[in-house]
Image (cartoon, coloured by chain):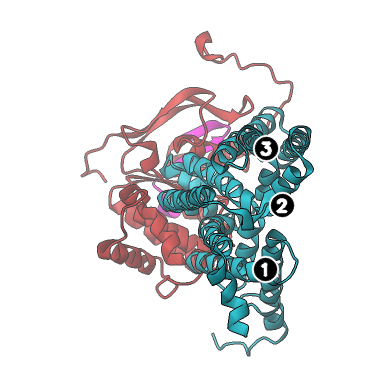
């Protein structure tokens, strides 16, 4: 990683993200350098998914801003936690994974021989060779997750955002998919993943952001995942107060709107 | 004898040939739209829209008689007004979109029937409500064919984003801005095809030649290309058989077409090879892997 030229892939400028004015991520400042492999951990409701939705531009910040260093927001590969995918829609695994090529093909671009080979290689990489013509409705949970990883693979993005990618996935599948994550890391891509398995984070992710609505700690994994930090994160309750007063932490009143 | 009953009506009478041409055009445009309506769980939205466009079509009808161009424009305006108003109300008040659409289409239907009955005759009202495919003039036929052509061209343009938006809307949102325009264009196509079906089948049944073939297709194919082909074919078959039935009996043409489609639908529910009832009752032996 040190050999590569590093720059700031993502910069958070005092970002607050939330719903109906209630913050779910509160005053986050910091940066993710390019090529980083960053785990985002924290209890349920800590704002991990909200942060990711902010990064990929689905959610507009309530205050502050997120910069992605010239990377078009639509060039970020995003694997959401609860993909609202209509599994009953009659589409084959091959075609579904092929949608990962959207940025290259767009509305009309043909899927030629080269693209077909790319799709086949992506399916092989996630161990789904032979599933090309199966409708996505017939896949198991683990196979569907492999399919989604194949699509991320095809998106060929410099920045990859994975929201709890190993949830409800068996050991074999998560090991396979983790190998893919490490391959992306080795290729110099920036990878962010929300995770709950601390052993997995300690074993494979060099950097960690511990989030509990507000950032608790951010840095090298071994320094972040200490007992007291984790306890502090757990203590910060999921505060959603209907009658909460407007936040005054903003120094600049112009942003309060 | 049999061939005479099946073919003679069309060789002998020009109005039957026109009707057949119209029904084929309607099938080519409407059936693919119906498949997408079904797959996007919007079948009843299509039904509601059919009622919502009535006042616009009625005003067009009163201003310029049975001029399909005027009726189409009026219908498009009314349809979009209702769709946008319903969308705005549900977005600003939190009322669910289906509930707000229901109120608007009912109001719209009442308004449409009122307009027709104040200004027109009972025969006009019957015509608007049930259509008459046997009274198709050249100009109307051209408009129907034109609308069907437009439908197929636009559908080809928005096909990819429309499919992706149906399967995984969040993904499309993260990679492209094409989702919303594709959705709007699709709604416009729904309205165009509903108005198109007016002359042939009337407001109440226009949606039938879109939804029933889609329902039939679901029982015979597992992929969307197959579904669209089967839907188009079954719509054409229903149209043709309905016209023959209507010619040989006293059944009005519109209901005859939809009734034939219904028979095909019931047959598909029973015998279809994708989830048909008989197939479920007598399943083949399970496989090894």
Residue position marked by numbered label 3 in the rendering:
B58
| The C terminus of chain A: image quadrant | top right
As for residue A211 lying within the magenta part, the answer is yes
Structural distance between the alpha carbons of marks 1 and 3: 28 Å
- Residue A138 drawn at (x, y percent): 56, 70
Magenta region, mostly helix, strand or loop? strand
Q: Which mark is residue B197?
A: none
Q: Where does the image place residue B61, in percent across and percent down from the top left?
A: 64, 38
| Magenta segment includes B244 | no
In the shown orientation, is residue B38 left or right of residue B171?
Answer: right
Q: Which shade of the palette goes to chain B?
A: cyan
Q: Please state the horizontal and vertical placement of residue A250, each as a whole percent of the image.
A: 53, 14
Write the residue at 73% across / 25% down.
A242
Q: Earlier in the sequence, mark 2 or mark 1?
A: 2
Image colour assigned to chain A: red
Residue A126, placed above or below residue B273: above
Q: Give the vertical position of B255 relative to B139 (above or below).
A: below
The answer for how far apart the CA atoms under marks 2 and 3 are is 13 Å
Question: Residue drawn at (62%, 54%), measured in percent from left and top?
Answer: B135
**Above or below for B289 versus A9:** below
Image quadrant where residue A71 sits: top left
Q: Nearer the viewer, mark 2 or mark 1?
A: 1
Q: Disc count in the image?
A: 3
Which of the two discs, 1 and 3, sits closer to the camera? 1
The region drawn magenta spans A202-217
Task: Return the mark for residue B247.
Answer: 1
Residue B26: x %, y % from top left: 55, 57
Q: Chain of mark 1?
A: B
Q: Can residue A193 be seen at all in this image of the molecule?
A: no
- The chain carrying label 3 is B
Residue B272 seen anywhere in this rendered image of the structure: yes
Question: Which residue was labeled with disc 2?
Answer: B130
């Amino acid at each position: 990683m040190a050999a590569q030229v590093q720059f700031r892939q993502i910069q958070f400028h005092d970002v607050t993200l939330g719903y109906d004015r209630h913050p779910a991520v509160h005053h986050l400042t910091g940066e993710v350098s390019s090529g980083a492999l960053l785990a985002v951990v924290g209890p349920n409701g800590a704002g991990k998914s909200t942060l990711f939705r902010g990064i990929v531009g689905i959610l507009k910040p309530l205050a502050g801003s997120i910069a992605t260093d010239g990377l078009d927001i639509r060039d970020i590969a995003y694997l959401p936690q609860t993909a609202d995918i209509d599994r009953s829609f009659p589409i084959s695994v091959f075609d579904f994974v092929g949608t990962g090529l959207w940025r290259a093909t767009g509305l009309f671009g043909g899927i030629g021989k080269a693209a077909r080979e790319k799709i086949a290689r992506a399916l092989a990489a996630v161990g789904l060779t032979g599933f090309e013509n199966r409708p996505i409705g017939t896949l198991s949970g683990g196979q569907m997750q492999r399919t989604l990883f194949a699509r991320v693979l095809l998106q060929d993005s410099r920045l990859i955002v994975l929201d709890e990618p190993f949830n409800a996935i068996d050991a074999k599948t998560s090991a396979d998919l983790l190998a893919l994550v490490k391959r992306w890391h080795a290729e110099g891509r920036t990878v962010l993943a929300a995770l709950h398995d601390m052993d997995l984070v300690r074993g494979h992710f060099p950097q960690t952001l511990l989030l509990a609505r507000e950032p608790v700690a951010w840095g090298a994994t071994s320094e972040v995942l200490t007992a007291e930090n984790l306890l502090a994160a757990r203590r910060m309750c999921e505060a959603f107060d209907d009658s909460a007063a407007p936040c005054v932490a903003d120094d600049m009143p112009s942003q309060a709107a | 004898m049999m061939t005479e009953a099946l073919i003679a009506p069309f060789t002998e009478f020009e109005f039957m040939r026109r009707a057949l041409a119209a029904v084929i055009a309607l099938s080519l445009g409407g059936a693919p739209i119906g498949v997408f309506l079904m797959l996007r769980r919007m079948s009843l939205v299509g039904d509601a829209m059919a009622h919502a466009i009535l006042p616009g079509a009625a005003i067009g009808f009163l201003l310029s008689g049975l001029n399909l161009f005027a009726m189409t424009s009026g219908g498009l305006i009314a349809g979009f007004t209702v769709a946008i108003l319903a969308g705005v109300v549900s977005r600003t008040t939190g009322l669910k979109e289906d509930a707000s659409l229901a109120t608007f289409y009912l109001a719209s239907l009442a308004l449409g029937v009122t307009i027709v009955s104040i200004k027109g005759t009972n025969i006009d009202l019957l015509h608007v409500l049930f259509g008459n495919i046997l009274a198709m003039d050249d100009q109307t036929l051209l408009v129907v064919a034109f609308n069907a052509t437009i439908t197929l061209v636009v559908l080809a343009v928005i096909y990819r984003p429309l499919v992706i938006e149906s399967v995984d809307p969040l993904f499309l949102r993260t990679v492209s801005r094409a989702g919303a325009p594709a959705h709007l264009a699709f709604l416009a196509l729904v309205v165009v095809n509903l108005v198109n079906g007016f002359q042939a089948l009337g407001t109440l049944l226009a949606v039938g030649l879109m939804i029933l073939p889609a329902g039939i297709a679901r029982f015979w194919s597992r992929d969307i290309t197959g579904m669209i082909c089967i839907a188009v074919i079954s719509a054409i078959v229903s149209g043709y058989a309905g016209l023959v039935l209507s010619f040989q009996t006293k059944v009005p043409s519109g209901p005859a077409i939809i009734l034939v489609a219904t028979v095909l639908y019931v047959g598909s529910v029973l015998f279809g090879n994708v989830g048909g009832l008989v197939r479920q009752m007598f399943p083949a032996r399970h496989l090894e892997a």
